[in-house]
Amino acid sequence: MGKLFAVVVAIIALVSAAIFALHIWWLPPDISAHGVRIDRQLSETMVSSGILFVLAQLALALFVWQASGTTRGIKTFPGGATPMVVLALVLVGAEILVLTFVGSKVWASIYQTPPDPNSLQIEVQAEQFAFYFRYAGADGKFGAMHPELMNDANENFFGLDPANDSTARDDIVVGSLTIPVNHPILLQLHAKDVNHAFYVPELRIQQDFVPGMVIPLHFTATKTGKYEIVCTQLCGLGHYNMRAYVEVLPQDQFDQWLKVKAAQQ
Amino acid sequence: MTSAVHHHAAPRGFLRTHVFSVDHKVIGRQYLDLALVAVVTGMVLSWLMRLHLAWPETPIPGLGKLSPNGAAGGVITPEYYLSLMTMHGTIMVFFVLTTAPFAGFGNYFLPIQIGAEDMAFPRINMMSFWVTLVAFLVLISAFFVSDGPALSGWTAYAPLSAVGKDAGPGQGTGQTLWAVSIALFCVAQLLGSLNFIVTTLDLRAKGMSLARMPLSTWAWFITAVIGLIAFAVLMPACILLLLDRLAGTSFFIPAGLVISDRLQPHSGGSPLLWQHLFWFFGHPEVYIAILPGFGIISHVLPAFARKPLLGPRVFIVCLIAIAFLSYTVWGHHMFLSGMNPFSATLFSVPTLIITIPATIVTLLWIGTVYGAKLRLATPALFCLGFISVFVSGGISGFFLAQPSIDTYLHGTYFVVGHFHFVMGVAAMFGIFAGIYFWFPKMFGRMMSETLGKWHFWLTFIGVYGVFMPMHFIGLAGNVRRYAAFTDDYLKPLVPVHKFMTIAALLTGAAQLIFLFNLIRSRIRGARATDNPWQATTLEWSTASPPPFDNFGGRPPVVARGPQEYGASGAAGGDGGSDDYVMQAAPDR
């Protein structure tokens, strides 16, 4: 029975590790400027913790194999508990130090650095169960948001007041995100009703929307194409269906798109 | 040592003996019975969820009749899916993983293991069980209200949970019942924790110094200390949530919310406040669920390895370190919540540091197996299985503790796989090890070893089939809490979901073997001796089952430590029946 346990544990550990190592299921290709560092951090964590995972499972398997059906007397682990404490402190401690120092730099580059001053600023409104995006229009200014004017039936998703607010008149409001490639983007996240989240796996970015807060999120997309934005914060019955698209265009095509949208206002 | 001795007379009559009993053993069994009902309920809910995720359009036979609103014609609606998920999580975390290993086994065995006649406060003990039962009934009653149970998850994030029925079905009465239930549960746990702490400190038998306490008792004691702080935060949080819902306050609701085109009459609250309060409880709760398992494994494994746990004092120090650190890590659930990103690093470091005591404990178990004379009865198999799944679940914590990787993995199935392994499956394996180990003591009969082994193998392989693939699809970006996978990039992952569903159904079916064994052994199991496993602690020095006052009027006197197995025992580790010395054996 013990030998069977050892074999089963070894098989489970090796097959699981192989599936991770062979990237049978893996992250979609990265399309962001910062993503390469996240991917590297993830790969390094995968290798170091993968080794710990396999070693721990195989050690368990080996010891169970040796200890089952034995006729010898019991043996204490050489050195007692001390080598275990030292091993954990050194191995895991080293891993923690590396992960923390490297990892916090990656985190800081995404979330703790100010956005590029030349960023294209886009406002995002999340609501049950849709995202809306707003561009400032020709005047470069966003009209103020008035919660009392927010109304889906009138398609006033941002609560704009164009009658009294001249900066709101040329704001462009659309249901999908269109951005230029290789240009820094700054999103300002607003939530109209409950918590939501902005997640684009290819962009390696995820951020909650929180009612009452405006949360900045900046990134640069490096590949053109169309990708899905999904909500990852439970927001109600339509949560699974809350999505939009982000379309990354060459700069000239983006300028053209913006011009067409501005003309439609 | 015994500064207070607790006596009360044996009860008379059926009600006082079996229902409204103040006997800690009856209360412990009541908690375990409640957890059994809860775990069956929670598991059935998970089957429904898994069936729906794999075959969303296929009607589930009979479900349409049981739940005409949520699953008309047997097809689960998206909102009903979320309700099932909310109830599954809430039932499992609170009424199974907290109730069984801590309140259940702890109540039954902590007093016996320290040589006491009962808990320090038997009436409060009885009250804590009955309040827990009421909390469970209140939670379950949400299935029978018109718009169904809450759908905001076991974490009940505000404002979704705070604004009332405008936020969707289930967010009316169902969510109110959820908050009432959890507040009541907190009251019960606070009473229970207090009782555990006082009992451990005050009612130990002569000679039972802290250093001689069994490691399971240490784990329950430390868990009680964690619980006393954690539930004391969640209870007021639930009351504030109820006030927001019912009394028009705005603790968790900011100004300017527009729901269903209606401007909400609230201002000044903070949704993040709820998250901070919830996770200040929620992360220690993970340890409330798993530390009793640590204790059970460290108590049971040596009895089957025929040698003491490697480094028992190191183990206790690690438990205390984990308890302390558990209060410094809650923000790792909130890296992407909109909290100040600078604090992410602050929460990341202790989260990574807490892996050090957890790793040491794991290595102590593995080191205990080294050079053992393993007796592979079912409790031992579940101990070994526990170590394996705990390693698997713990390792993935390295990823999620790093904010930069959490940026990608947060909100995916990687997280679901992680916490199911580390606090769900591992804790369940601890519970199973405890049941197979202590059943003979509790009922005076042995459980079937053959059925136990079948149960172990099918469960062990099954849980890997269910939860390991969640890590794979999480890496591929598969988001959690989705009632269906309609996104283009998620559709290729549906076959993996079908595989996990089949694995979950098979693993669930294997639990029927356990249930059958449990019931059959109660009635027809072979008679158990007082000490069938040749174990050393005080519960094995008394009759199976123990008499009303635990030791038949002869309080034990403790002369030695809890794990005198093998070489340190009488015969020097020859593997015979005399390779152990009991704690209550007279001094040499």
Image (spheres, coloured by chain):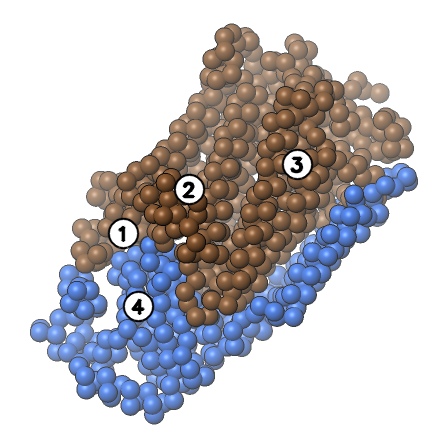
Report in which chain the residue with disc 2 lies: B
Residue at 58% across, 42% down: B509
Q: Residue type at mark 2: give it.
A: Gly
Q: Which of the two discs, 2 and 3, labels the residue nearer the N terminus?
A: 2
Q: Are the residues under badges 2 and 3 in a single subunit? A: yes
Task: Say left or right for A145 vs B497.
Answer: left
Chain A as rendered: colour: blue
Labels 1 and 4 within one chain = no
Task: Identify whether A227 is placed above or below A13.
Answer: below
Q: Secondary structure at mark 1?
A: helix
Dot 4: chain letter: A
Residue B433, labelled with which disc?
Answer: 3
Q: Which chain is brown?
A: B
Q: Amino acid at mark 1?
A: Ala
Looking at the image, residue A33 lies above or below residue B394: below
Label for residue B62?
A: 2
| Contact (Cβ within 8 Å) of mark 3 with mark 1 | no
Q: Nearer the viewer, residue B263 or B585?
A: B263
Q: Give the residue at mark 4.
A: A131
Q: Name the amino acid, label 4.
A: Phe
Q: Which residue is mark 1?
A: B167
